[in-house]
Protein backbone atom coordinates (compact mmCIF):
# COMPACT_ATOMS: atom_id res chain seq x y z
CA UNK A 1 0.00 0.00 0.00
CA UNK A 2 2.93 2.35 0.60
CA UNK A 3 4.61 3.10 -2.71
CA UNK A 4 8.09 4.62 -2.75
CA UNK A 5 8.50 7.48 -5.19
CA UNK A 6 11.38 7.22 -7.61
CA UNK A 7 13.89 10.09 -7.51
CA UNK A 8 12.28 11.64 -10.61
CA UNK A 9 8.79 11.36 -9.13
CA UNK A 10 9.94 12.75 -5.80
CA UNK A 11 11.60 15.74 -7.47
CA UNK A 12 8.35 16.57 -9.28
CA UNK A 13 6.05 15.91 -6.31
CA UNK A 14 8.02 17.26 -3.35
CA UNK A 15 8.91 20.68 -4.68
CA UNK A 16 10.51 21.89 -1.45
CA UNK A 17 12.16 18.78 -0.05
CA UNK A 18 13.53 17.42 -3.33
CA UNK A 19 12.98 20.31 -5.74
CA UNK A 20 15.12 22.66 -3.68
CA UNK A 21 17.89 20.17 -3.13
CA UNK A 22 20.70 19.88 -5.64
CA UNK A 23 20.55 16.77 -7.89
CA UNK A 24 22.83 14.08 -6.48
CA UNK A 25 22.16 15.15 -2.89
CA UNK A 26 19.74 12.92 -0.94
CA UNK A 27 17.19 15.09 0.86
CA UNK A 28 16.41 13.95 4.42
CA UNK A 29 15.51 17.30 5.90
CA UNK A 30 12.01 18.82 5.71
CA UNK A 31 9.16 16.73 7.18
CA UNK A 32 7.61 15.25 4.07
CA UNK A 33 7.60 11.61 3.02
CA UNK A 34 9.00 10.08 -0.16
CA UNK A 35 5.81 8.06 -0.63
CA UNK A 36 2.98 8.35 -3.15
CA UNK A 37 -0.17 9.81 -1.61
CA UNK A 38 -2.99 7.57 -0.43
CA UNK A 39 -5.38 6.68 -3.26
CA UNK A 40 -8.39 7.64 -1.15
CA UNK A 41 -7.04 11.19 -0.89
CA UNK A 42 -6.01 11.47 -4.55
CA UNK A 43 -9.40 10.15 -5.73
CA UNK A 44 -11.31 12.61 -3.56
CA UNK A 45 -9.19 15.50 -4.83
CA UNK A 46 -9.62 14.52 -8.49
CA UNK A 47 -13.37 14.24 -8.04
CA UNK A 48 -13.52 17.62 -6.28
CA UNK A 49 -11.54 19.37 -9.02
CA UNK A 50 -13.64 17.75 -11.77
CA UNK A 51 -16.81 18.96 -10.12
CA UNK A 52 -15.42 22.47 -9.86
CA UNK A 53 -14.95 22.53 -6.11
CA UNK A 54 -12.40 25.32 -6.31
CA UNK A 55 -14.62 27.83 -4.51
CA UNK A 56 -14.19 29.54 -1.14
CA UNK A 57 -14.35 27.08 1.74
CA UNK A 58 -17.20 27.19 4.24
CA UNK A 59 -16.48 29.18 7.40
CA UNK A 60 -17.83 27.02 10.17
CA UNK A 61 -17.04 25.08 13.28
CA UNK A 62 -18.22 21.52 12.79
CA UNK A 63 -19.74 20.59 9.45
CA UNK A 64 -18.51 17.60 7.46
CA UNK A 65 -14.91 18.20 8.48
CA UNK A 66 -15.84 18.42 12.17
CA UNK A 67 -17.75 15.16 11.97
CA UNK A 68 -14.94 13.42 10.06
CA UNK A 69 -12.35 14.56 12.62
CA UNK A 70 -14.53 13.57 15.58
CA UNK A 71 -15.09 10.06 14.17
CA UNK A 72 -11.37 9.72 13.45
CA UNK A 73 -10.32 10.88 16.91
CA UNK A 74 -12.73 8.39 18.48
CA UNK A 75 -11.37 5.50 16.36
CA UNK A 76 -7.69 6.40 16.42
CA UNK A 77 -7.23 7.79 19.92
CA UNK A 78 -10.41 6.95 21.84
CA UNK A 79 -10.83 10.73 22.23
CA UNK A 80 -14.37 12.08 22.28
CA UNK A 81 -14.49 15.34 20.35
CA UNK A 82 -17.57 17.47 19.82
CA UNK A 83 -17.69 18.01 16.02
CA UNK A 84 -18.90 21.53 16.71
CA UNK A 85 -15.57 22.27 18.42
CA UNK A 86 -13.51 21.73 15.22
CA UNK A 87 -12.57 24.82 13.20
CA UNK A 88 -10.42 24.71 10.07
CA UNK A 89 -7.32 26.90 9.99
CA UNK A 90 -4.82 27.34 7.19
CA UNK A 91 -2.10 25.31 8.84
CA UNK A 92 -0.89 24.38 12.28
CA UNK A 93 1.60 27.20 12.64
CA UNK A 94 -0.92 29.83 11.53
CA UNK A 95 -3.47 28.25 13.87
CA UNK A 96 -1.01 28.60 16.72
CA UNK A 97 -0.52 32.27 15.91
CA UNK A 98 -4.30 32.73 15.68
CA UNK A 99 -4.87 31.06 19.06
CA UNK A 100 -2.12 33.14 20.67
CA UNK A 101 -3.54 36.34 19.25
CA UNK A 102 -7.13 35.69 20.16
CA UNK A 103 -7.02 33.61 23.34
CA UNK A 104 -3.81 34.26 25.20
CA UNK A 105 -2.81 37.02 27.55
CA UNK A 106 -0.30 39.55 26.29
CA UNK A 107 2.51 37.94 28.27
CA UNK A 108 5.56 35.72 27.62
CA UNK A 109 5.13 32.30 26.01
CA UNK A 110 6.98 29.21 27.23
CA UNK A 111 8.54 27.21 24.41
CA UNK A 112 10.28 23.91 25.17
CA UNK A 113 13.40 23.72 22.99
CA UNK A 114 14.60 22.19 20.77
CA UNK A 115 11.38 23.01 18.90
CA UNK A 116 9.97 22.89 15.38
CA UNK A 117 11.96 25.80 13.98
CA UNK A 118 9.28 27.99 12.29
CA UNK A 119 7.45 28.06 15.62
CA UNK A 120 10.44 29.52 17.44
CA UNK A 121 9.27 32.90 16.12
CA UNK A 122 5.54 32.52 16.68
CA UNK A 123 5.52 34.25 20.07
CA UNK A 124 7.51 37.18 18.73
CA UNK A 125 5.27 37.77 15.69
CA UNK A 126 2.32 38.10 18.05
CA UNK A 127 4.27 40.67 20.07
CA UNK A 128 5.07 38.31 22.94
CA UNK A 129 8.40 37.29 24.39
CA UNK A 130 9.53 33.67 24.10
CA UNK A 131 10.82 31.97 27.24
CA UNK A 132 12.84 28.86 26.42
CA UNK A 133 12.50 25.73 28.47
CA UNK A 134 15.65 23.93 27.44
CA UNK A 135 15.52 20.17 27.56
CA UNK A 136 18.56 18.44 28.95
CA UNK A 137 20.53 17.24 25.91
CA UNK A 138 21.97 14.42 28.01
CA UNK A 139 18.69 13.09 29.36
CA UNK A 140 17.87 9.56 28.28
CA UNK A 141 14.28 10.49 27.66
CA UNK A 142 13.50 14.11 26.87
CA UNK A 143 10.76 15.61 29.01
CA UNK A 144 9.33 18.86 30.28
CA UNK A 145 11.00 20.04 33.48
CA UNK A 146 7.99 20.85 35.65
CA UNK A 147 10.06 22.93 38.08
CA UNK A 148 11.36 25.09 35.24
CA UNK A 149 7.85 25.38 33.79
CA UNK A 150 6.48 26.47 37.18
CA UNK A 151 9.33 28.99 37.46
CA UNK A 152 8.59 30.51 34.04
CA UNK A 153 4.88 30.81 34.82
CA UNK A 154 5.59 32.27 38.26
CA UNK A 155 7.78 34.86 36.51
CA UNK A 156 4.88 36.01 34.34
CA UNK A 157 4.63 33.68 31.33
CA UNK A 158 1.00 32.86 30.58
CA UNK A 159 1.05 30.34 27.72
CA UNK A 160 2.80 27.02 27.17
CA UNK A 161 3.35 25.72 23.66
CA UNK A 162 3.23 21.98 23.93
CA UNK A 163 4.16 19.73 21.03
CA UNK A 164 2.62 16.32 21.58
CA UNK A 165 4.04 14.08 20.08
CA UNK A 166 7.20 16.10 20.02
CA UNK A 167 9.26 17.13 17.01
CA UNK A 168 12.25 16.89 17.08
CA UNK A 169 12.55 14.71 20.21
CA UNK A 170 10.27 11.99 18.82
CA UNK A 171 8.69 11.73 22.28
CA UNK A 172 5.08 10.83 23.02
CA UNK A 173 4.29 12.18 26.46
CA UNK A 174 2.60 9.78 28.84
CA UNK A 175 -0.63 10.48 30.66
CA UNK A 176 1.36 11.01 33.86
CA UNK A 177 3.63 13.57 32.20
CA UNK A 178 0.69 15.41 30.65
CA UNK A 179 -1.16 15.47 33.97
CA UNK A 180 1.92 16.91 35.63
CA UNK A 181 2.04 19.68 33.03
CA UNK A 182 -1.68 20.33 33.43
CA UNK A 183 -1.39 20.64 37.21
CA UNK A 184 1.37 23.25 36.95
CA UNK A 185 -0.52 25.19 34.26
CA UNK A 186 -3.78 25.19 36.22
CA UNK A 187 -1.99 26.24 39.40
CA UNK A 188 -0.65 29.32 37.61
CA UNK A 189 -3.82 30.10 35.65
CA UNK A 190 -2.00 29.77 32.31
CA UNK A 191 -3.03 28.45 28.89
CA UNK A 192 -1.79 25.63 26.68
CA UNK A 193 -1.65 25.48 22.91
CA UNK A 194 -1.03 21.83 22.09
CA UNK A 195 0.39 21.09 18.64
CA UNK A 196 -0.72 17.52 17.90
CA UNK A 197 0.05 17.35 14.18
CA UNK A 198 2.18 14.22 14.65
CA UNK A 199 -0.50 12.30 16.59
CA UNK A 200 -1.42 9.96 13.70
CA UNK A 201 2.24 8.95 13.47
CA UNK A 202 2.59 7.38 16.90
CA UNK A 203 4.60 4.18 16.44
CA UNK A 204 3.99 0.80 18.09
CA UNK A 205 4.81 0.92 21.78
CA UNK A 206 3.39 4.37 22.49
CA UNK A 207 -0.10 5.81 22.74
CA UNK A 208 -1.26 9.30 21.83
CA UNK A 209 -3.27 11.13 24.46
CA UNK A 210 -4.53 14.51 23.40
CA UNK A 211 -3.89 17.18 26.01
CA UNK A 212 -7.57 18.08 25.59
CA UNK A 213 -8.55 14.52 26.56
CA UNK A 214 -7.34 15.14 30.13
CA UNK A 215 -9.82 16.26 32.75
CA UNK A 216 -9.57 19.90 33.63
CA UNK A 217 -8.03 21.14 30.38
CA UNK A 218 -11.11 22.22 28.38
CA UNK A 219 -11.17 25.79 29.67
CA UNK A 220 -7.49 26.57 29.24
CA UNK A 221 -6.32 24.65 26.16
CA UNK A 222 -6.76 24.24 22.44
CA UNK A 223 -5.21 21.53 20.28
CA UNK A 224 -3.98 21.90 16.73
CA UNK A 225 -4.42 18.84 14.57
CA UNK A 226 -4.15 17.97 10.88
CA UNK A 227 -4.13 15.08 8.46
CA UNK A 228 -1.42 16.84 6.49
CA UNK A 229 1.69 15.39 8.14
CA UNK A 230 0.52 11.79 8.08
CA UNK A 231 -0.95 11.98 4.57
CA UNK A 232 1.71 14.23 2.97
CA UNK A 233 -0.76 16.98 2.05
CA UNK A 234 0.91 19.99 3.69
CA UNK A 235 0.66 22.04 0.50
CA UNK A 236 -3.13 21.80 0.47
CA UNK A 237 -3.36 24.05 3.52
CA UNK A 238 -5.94 22.85 5.97
CA UNK A 239 -5.34 22.12 9.65
CA UNK A 240 -7.88 22.23 12.45
CA UNK A 241 -8.09 23.90 15.82
CA UNK A 242 -9.98 21.99 18.51
CA UNK A 243 -11.52 23.73 21.45
CA UNK A 244 -12.63 22.05 24.64
CA UNK A 245 -15.57 24.28 25.40
CA UNK A 246 -18.11 26.62 23.81
CA UNK A 247 -16.66 29.78 25.32
CA UNK A 248 -13.28 29.25 23.64
CA UNK A 249 -14.99 28.33 20.38
CA UNK A 250 -17.05 31.51 20.47
CA UNK A 251 -14.00 33.68 21.04
CA UNK A 252 -12.32 32.15 17.98
CA UNK A 253 -15.47 32.39 15.90
CA UNK A 254 -15.95 36.04 16.83
CA UNK A 255 -12.38 36.97 15.86
CA UNK A 256 -12.18 39.18 12.77
CA UNK A 257 -11.73 37.14 9.58
CA UNK A 258 -8.64 39.14 8.78
CA UNK A 259 -6.87 37.46 11.72
CA UNK A 260 -7.41 33.93 10.46
CA UNK A 261 -5.80 33.25 7.08
CA UNK A 262 -8.18 31.12 5.10
CA UNK A 263 -7.60 27.43 4.56
CA UNK A 264 -8.29 25.83 1.18
CA UNK A 265 -11.34 23.99 -0.06
CA UNK A 266 -9.15 21.21 -1.49
CA UNK A 267 -7.38 20.95 1.85
CA UNK A 268 -10.75 20.31 3.47
CA UNK A 269 -11.55 17.65 0.82
CA UNK A 270 -8.22 15.91 1.46
CA UNK A 271 -8.63 16.03 5.24
CA UNK A 272 -12.15 14.59 5.12
CA UNK A 273 -11.04 11.79 2.78
CA UNK A 274 -8.07 10.98 4.99
CA UNK A 275 -10.10 10.98 8.20
CA UNK A 276 -13.03 9.01 6.76
CA UNK A 277 -11.22 6.51 4.56
CA UNK A 278 -7.49 6.67 5.38
CA UNK A 279 -7.21 4.18 8.25
CA UNK A 280 -5.86 1.23 6.19
CA UNK A 281 -3.27 3.41 4.42
CA UNK A 282 -2.21 4.97 7.70
CA UNK A 283 -1.84 1.54 9.31
CA UNK A 284 0.44 0.48 6.43
CA UNK A 285 2.41 3.71 6.78
CA UNK A 286 2.95 3.23 10.50
CA UNK A 287 4.12 -0.33 9.82
CA UNK A 288 6.63 0.98 7.26
CA UNK A 289 7.87 3.71 9.59
CA UNK A 290 8.29 1.17 12.36
CA UNK A 291 10.47 -0.89 9.99
CA UNK A 292 12.45 2.20 9.04
CA UNK A 293 12.99 3.00 12.72
CA UNK A 294 14.41 -0.49 13.28
CA UNK A 295 16.57 -0.21 10.17
CA UNK A 296 17.94 3.15 11.30
CA UNK A 297 18.92 1.73 14.69
CA UNK A 298 20.72 -1.17 12.98
CA UNK A 299 22.49 1.11 10.52
CA UNK A 300 23.63 3.47 13.26
CA UNK A 301 24.88 0.62 15.43
CA UNK A 302 27.00 -0.63 12.53
CA UNK A 303 28.18 2.54 10.86
CA UNK A 304 27.89 5.34 13.42
CA UNK A 305 28.16 3.56 16.77
CA UNK A 306 28.88 6.79 18.66
CA UNK A 307 25.60 8.36 17.51
CA UNK A 308 22.96 8.64 20.21
CA UNK A 309 19.36 8.23 19.21
CA UNK A 310 16.72 8.50 21.87
CA UNK A 311 13.78 6.14 21.42
CA UNK A 312 11.75 7.31 18.42
CA UNK A 313 8.23 6.95 19.76
CA UNK A 314 6.44 8.84 16.98
CA UNK A 315 7.05 10.56 13.66
CA UNK A 316 9.63 9.81 11.02
CA UNK A 317 12.07 12.40 12.30
CA UNK A 318 14.99 11.04 14.27
CA UNK A 319 16.90 13.40 16.54
CA UNK A 320 20.53 12.32 16.61
CA UNK A 321 23.20 13.43 19.02
CA UNK A 322 26.44 13.27 17.03
CA UNK A 323 28.59 15.26 19.45
CA UNK A 324 30.92 12.30 19.90
CA UNK A 325 32.12 12.80 16.31
CA UNK A 326 33.47 16.22 17.23
CA UNK A 327 31.75 18.49 14.70
CA UNK A 328 29.77 21.53 15.78
CA UNK A 329 27.61 21.41 12.66
CA UNK A 330 27.41 17.79 11.47
CA UNK A 331 24.62 18.63 9.00
CA UNK A 332 26.88 20.91 6.99
CA UNK A 333 29.70 18.33 7.04
CA UNK A 334 27.29 15.65 5.78
CA UNK A 335 26.08 17.96 3.02
CA UNK A 336 29.49 19.02 1.79
CA UNK A 337 31.29 15.69 2.19
CA UNK A 338 28.48 13.15 1.86
CA UNK A 339 25.92 14.91 -0.34
CA UNK A 340 23.09 14.18 2.07
CA UNK A 341 20.89 17.00 3.31
CA UNK A 342 19.88 16.73 6.97
CA UNK A 343 18.21 19.30 9.20
CA UNK A 344 20.76 21.05 11.42
CA UNK A 345 20.14 20.71 15.16
CA UNK A 346 20.84 24.39 15.81
CA UNK A 347 17.79 25.29 13.71
CA UNK A 348 15.66 23.71 16.43
CA UNK A 349 17.68 24.93 19.37
CA UNK A 350 19.71 28.02 18.57
CA UNK A 351 23.16 27.76 20.05
CA UNK A 352 23.20 23.99 20.46
CA UNK A 353 25.81 22.00 18.59
CA UNK A 354 26.41 18.50 17.32
CA UNK A 355 22.83 17.39 16.63
CA UNK A 356 20.90 16.65 13.44
CA UNK A 357 17.37 15.63 12.57
CA UNK A 358 17.10 12.87 10.00
CA UNK A 359 13.92 12.20 8.02
CA UNK A 360 13.53 8.41 7.68
CA UNK A 361 10.28 8.43 5.65
CA UNK A 362 11.89 7.08 2.54
CA UNK A 363 12.79 3.71 1.06
CA UNK A 364 15.03 1.27 2.96
CA UNK A 365 17.61 1.65 0.17
CA UNK A 366 17.71 5.45 0.49
CA UNK A 367 17.86 5.28 4.28
CA UNK A 368 20.80 2.90 4.00
CA UNK A 369 22.52 5.28 1.58
CA UNK A 370 21.82 8.23 3.91
CA UNK A 371 23.52 6.57 6.88
CA UNK A 372 26.44 5.35 4.75
CA UNK A 373 26.97 8.90 3.51
CA UNK A 374 26.74 10.32 7.02
CA UNK A 375 29.23 7.80 8.34
CA UNK A 376 31.70 8.51 5.54
CA UNK A 377 31.39 12.25 6.15
CA UNK A 378 31.69 12.20 9.91
CA UNK A 379 34.45 9.68 10.24
CA UNK A 380 36.62 10.92 7.35
C1 LIG B 1 5.47 19.98 15.38
C2 LIG B 1 5.10 20.55 14.07
N1 LIG B 1 4.12 21.44 13.99
C3 LIG B 1 3.74 21.97 12.82
C4 LIG B 1 4.37 21.61 11.65
C5 LIG B 1 3.97 22.25 10.37
O1 LIG B 1 2.63 22.24 10.21
P1 LIG B 1 1.95 23.27 9.24
O2 LIG B 1 2.63 23.14 7.91
O3 LIG B 1 0.52 22.82 9.24
O4 LIG B 1 2.14 24.61 9.88
C6 LIG B 1 5.38 20.67 11.67
C7 LIG B 1 6.04 20.27 10.42
O5 LIG B 1 6.82 19.41 10.35
C8 LIG B 1 5.75 20.13 12.91
O6 LIG B 1 6.72 19.23 12.99
Image (spheres, grey):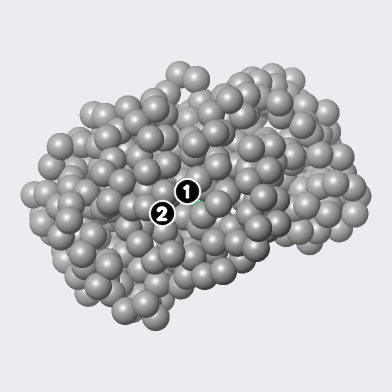
Residue 79's x, y, as percent? 30, 33
Mark 2 or mark 1: whose residue is earlier in sequence: 1
> Which quarter of the image is occupied by the C terminus?
top right
Question: Decide: marks 2, 1 in contact (CB < 8 A)?
Answer: yes
Neighbour tally class for label 1: few under 14, some 14-19, many 20 plus, Cα within 10 Å: many
Q: Which residue lies at the image location 38% right of the left edge and 35% below the top edge?
A: 71
| Residue at image coords 39%, 66% | 59
Mark 2 is surrounded, within 10 Å at the Cα level, by few (under 14), some (14 to 19) or many (20 or more) other residues, namely many
Mark 1, ligand 1, within 8 Å: the answer is yes
Residue under circle 2? 240
Q: Is residue 188 left or right of residue 29?
A: left
Query: What residue would you read off at disc 1?
Result: 226
Q: Is residue 99 left or right of residue 307?
A: left
Q: Which residue is drawn at 18% across and 52% down?
A: 245
Res 246 quadrant in image: bottom left
Q: Observer-nearest residue: 293 or 203?
A: 203
Amino acid sequence: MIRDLTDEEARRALVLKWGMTEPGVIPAWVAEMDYAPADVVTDALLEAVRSGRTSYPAYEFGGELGRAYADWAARQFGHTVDPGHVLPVVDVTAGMRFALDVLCEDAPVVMPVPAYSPQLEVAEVTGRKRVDLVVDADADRAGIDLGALAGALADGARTLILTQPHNPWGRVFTRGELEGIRDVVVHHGARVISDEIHAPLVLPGAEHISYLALDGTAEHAVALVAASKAFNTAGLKCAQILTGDDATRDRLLDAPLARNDSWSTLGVVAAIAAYNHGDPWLAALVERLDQQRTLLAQLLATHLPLARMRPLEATYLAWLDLRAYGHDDPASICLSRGRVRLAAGHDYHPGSTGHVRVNIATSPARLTDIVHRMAKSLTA
